[in-house]
């Protein structure tokens, strides 16, 4: 064997050992690489109690333009503000606010809270030194059994749905009543006849929400659909469930990263509740079983289903309320039974 061959052999063996070592080092890293879940659990926060910063019979949830979370508590009449990670930032009560029910926040940070017991909407300006709050009064019958929901669009228009009256009242950014309209798919001439005859609501309706697409959505859970309108109240169509042809995703805390695991299947259409949120492309709506989250495309075709039972618990008798961040990337699920909030990252 020549000197050149003697030198080449150890170099060859050394290269084999180095390659084997590299493969052994890279194998664990490769094994740990997993695809992100479409709905990835981030964290949970909130404790039950009647002190500031705690939750007591929470009714609704909203997210502002910088990601802070607002919750209306009916049990202690507190309005709570939290950072996205659950850190308490603000808690206040209004003397005349008896039954806080629905909550919304505009781009300027003003907070809107409905009180069906007084048929009013309280507008709070936390950063103002002069005008602390304003009150919008509806000329409808006050009732603690009524559903009074509120939402605000990017232009500052305020939409208040009075379920007993069967109408949406639209206020201008200057807090003046601009118009009222009946959230019905019926032609305008038919809705005008409803108003003229003073008839009650034309169909069962749920809360009102402004979607990420700028349209106004009203729940109609009895028909398993959402009604879509423009800012003038003109009917644009509805979003209703269609036969499913997608995967079902089970959100499970047993997964290594707590993000859940997907499996093939055909989700049942289910029966929706009035708890929903709408991004620019998707509808998120809770099922009547109070643990299944349906995700639809805006045409009503199903995108995913998520089983949240592992984190919500099996004994749910009331559907969680939903809220989305302005970019549609964070979903907040308000569990009214256990008085906590689940935060998920939307990866689709």
Image (cartoon, grey):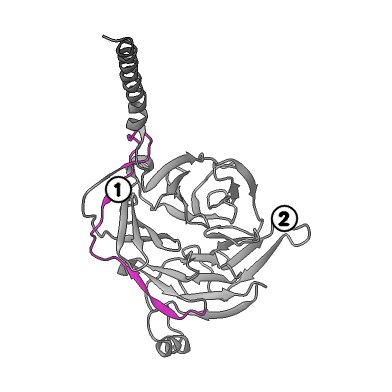
Q: Which mark is residue 127?
A: 2
Q: Residue furthest left?
A: 265
The disc, 1 or 2, on the residue closer to the chain's N-terminal end is: 2
Rounded to the nearest angstrom, the CA distance separating label 1 from label 2 is 42 Å
**Rendered location of residue 167, percent (x, y):** 48, 76
Q: Magenta span covers which residues?
A: 232-261
Q: Is residue 216 above or below residue 187?
A: above
Label 1 secondary element: strand
Using residue 344 as the reference point, say whether residue 114 is left or right of it: right
Residue 247 colored in magenta in the image: yes
Residue 267: tell me if it is visible: yes
Closer to the camera, 78 or 221? 221
Q: 310 or 231: nearer the eye?
A: 231
User: What residue do we see at 32% from left, 27% from top?
Assistant: 27
Which residue is at the front of the view, 199 or 191?
191
The residue at the point 27 percent across, 50 percent down is 248
For the N terminus, give its image quadrant: top left
- Which of the numbered marks, if any, corresponds to residue 249? 1
Main SS type for the magenta part?
Answer: loop
């Amino acid at each position: 064997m020549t000197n050149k061959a003697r030198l080449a052999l150890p170099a060859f063996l050394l290269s084999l050992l180095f390659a084997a070592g590299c493969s052994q080092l890279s194998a664990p890293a490769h094994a740990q690489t997993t695809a992100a879940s479409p709905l990835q659990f981030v964290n949970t926060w909130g404790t039950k109690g009647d002190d500031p910063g705690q939750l007591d019979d929470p009714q609704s949830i909203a997210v502002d333009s910088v990601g802070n979370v607002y919750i209306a508590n009916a049990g202690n009449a507190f309005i709570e503000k939290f950072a996205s990670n659950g850190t308490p930032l603000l808690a206040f009560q209004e003397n005349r606010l008896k039954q806080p029910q629905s909550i919304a926040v505009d781009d300027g940070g003003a907070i809107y809270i409905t009180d069906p017991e007084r048929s009013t909407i309280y507008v709070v300006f936390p950063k103002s030194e002069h005008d602390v709050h304003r009150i919008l009064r509806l000329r409808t019958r006050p009732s603690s059994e009524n559903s009074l929901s509120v939402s605000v669009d990017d232009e500052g228009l305020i939409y208040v749905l009075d379920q007993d009256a069967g109408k949406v009242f639209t206020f201008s950014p200057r807090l003046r009543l601009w118009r009222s309209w009946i959230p019905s798919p019926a032609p305008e001439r038919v809705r005008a006849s409803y108003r003229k005859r003073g008839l009650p609501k034309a169909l069962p309706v749920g809360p009102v929400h402004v979607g990420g697409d700028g349209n106004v959505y009203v729940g109609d859970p009895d028909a398993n659909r959402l009604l879509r309108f423009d800012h003038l109240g003109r009917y644009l169509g509805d979003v209703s469930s269609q036969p499913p042809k997608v995967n079902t995703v089970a959100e499970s805390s047993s997964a290594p990263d707590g993000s859940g695991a997907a499996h093939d299947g055909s989700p049942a259409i289910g029966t929706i509740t009035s708890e929903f949120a709408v991004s620019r492309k998707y509808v998120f709506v809770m099922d009547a079983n109070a643990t299944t989250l349906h995700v639809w495309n805006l045409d009503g075709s199903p995108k995913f289903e998520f089983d949240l039972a592992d984190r919500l618990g099996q004994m749910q008798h009331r559907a969680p309320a939903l809220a989305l961040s302005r970019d549609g990337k964070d979903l907040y699920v308000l569990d009214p039974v256990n008085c906590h909030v689940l935060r998920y990252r939307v990866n689709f």
